[in-house]
Amino acid sequence: MTMGADLRPDASTQLISPRALQWLEFALATPAVLWGGWPLFVRSWRSLVNRSQYVQTHRLGHGGFA
């Protein structure tokens, strides 16, 4: 959706405000990230709870969720 402004810069703010566009993109992206990353999140959480090492735990702790 953000790339639509590259195709038609004049129409990007006419259809929806930039603030509303940010919320819309957040709402559309969040389920995809949760669905795709769920196994990773579960395994990382379990390794933190069990205090065992898992390479993704380290990565997620340093900005993998951002």
Image: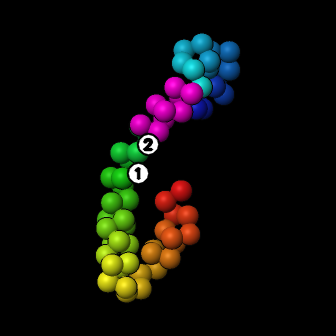
Residue at point 47%, 39% (across, down): 26
Q: Residues within 10 Å of mark 1 (few under 14, many from 20)?
A: few
Disc 1 and disc 2 in contact, CB within 8 angstroms: yes
Task: Say which quarter of the image contains residue 47.
Answer: bottom left
Our reading of the magenta stretch's main secondary structure is helix
Q: Which residue is mark 1?
A: 33
Query: Vertical placement of 54 versus 24: above or below?
Result: below
Q: Residues within 10 Å of mark 2 (few under 14, many from 20)?
A: few
Q: Position of residue 8 (x, y in %)?
A: 64, 19
Residue in the image at 41% along x and 37% along y: 28
- Residue occupying image coordinates x 51% and y 63%: 64
Mark number displayed over residue 25: none
From which residue to which does the magenta span run?
Answer: 19-27
CA gap, disc 1 and disc 2: 6 Å
Q: Nearest the camera: 48 or 37? A: 48
Total number of numbered discs in the rendering: 2
Q: Which residue is mark 2?
A: 29
Residue 45 is inside the magenta segment: no
